[in-house]
Image (spheres, grey):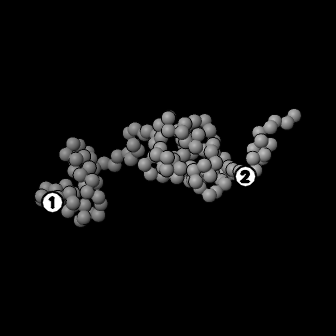
């Protein structure tokens, strides 16, 4: 990359020849300009800072969404899964794209909640069933 750059090849031409992205070429040339030969040693690929995808306010919203029936969101299903919750988070605007199940599991763990299994939501068209389900018996 460095030799091709010295021969006045553009990053796009170098990327095509090497088989990587243009940004990778730019990053490599920038590192070489800053650190010279030391840039050739292998570095850690771990990010220097890691921020959660969902901040505290969004995590609280996710927890609230998880306690609702999927039918509330117009979904024809009776079980709530992490994949379903990821789609709903995207639909309501908590994330620009659907999140992965591990990301949601991490968000729930940060709240102190645990996702154990899909929850079944049963609703009945009978108004008496709601009343019967909410009455406490001794």
Q: Where's residue 64, x and y in %?
A: 58, 40
Which of the labelled discs sits on residue 75, or is there none?
none
Does any portion of residue 76 appear in the rendered image?
yes
Which residue is the site of mark 1?
A: 9
Q: Determine whether label 1 and label 2 are within 8 Å by CB.
A: no
Does any portion of residue 133 appear in the rendered image?
no
**Residue at the extreme front of the image, as rendered:** 127
Front-lying residue, 64 or 107: 64
Name the secondary structure under disc 2. loop
Which residue is the site of mark 2?
A: 125
Q: Is residue 3 left or right of residue 27?
A: left
Q: Residue at x 85, y 36 (%)?
A: 137
Q: Residue at x 64, y 57 (%)?
A: 77
* Quadrant of the rendering where the C terminus is positioned: top right
The Cα–Cα distance between marks 1 and 2, rounded to whole angstroms, is: 70 Å
Q: Is residue 5 left or right of residue 114?
A: left
Front-lying residue, 37 or 61: 61
Q: Where's residue 86, x and y in %?
A: 53, 50
Q: Is residue 102 above or below residue 15?
A: above
Q: Where's residue 62, x and y in %?
A: 55, 42
Q: Is residue 1 left or right of residue 8?
A: right
**Which of the 4 image quadrants contains residue 12?**
bottom left
Front-lying residue, 76 or 118: 76
Name the secondary structure under disc 1. loop
Q: Residue at x 39, y 43 (%)?
A: 47
Q: Residue at x 38, y 39 (%)?
A: 48
């Amino acid at each position: 990359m460095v030799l091709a750059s010295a021969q006045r090849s553009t990053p796009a031409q170098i990327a095509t020849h090497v088989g990587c992205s243009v940004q990778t070429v730019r990053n490599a040339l920038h590192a070489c300009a800053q650190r010279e030969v030391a840039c050739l040693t292998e570095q850690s690929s771990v990010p220097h800072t890691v921020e959660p995808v969902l901040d505290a306010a969004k995590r609280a919203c996710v927890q609230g969404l998880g306690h609702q029936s999927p039918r509330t969101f117009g979904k024809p299903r009776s079980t709530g899964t992490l994949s379903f919750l990821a789609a709903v988070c995207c639909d309501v605007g908590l994330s620009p794209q659907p999140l992965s199940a591990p990301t949601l599991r991490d968000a729930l763990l940060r709240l102190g909640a645990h996702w154990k299994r899909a929850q079944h939501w049963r609703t009945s068209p009978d108004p008496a069933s709601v009343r019967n389900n909410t009455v406490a018996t001794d």
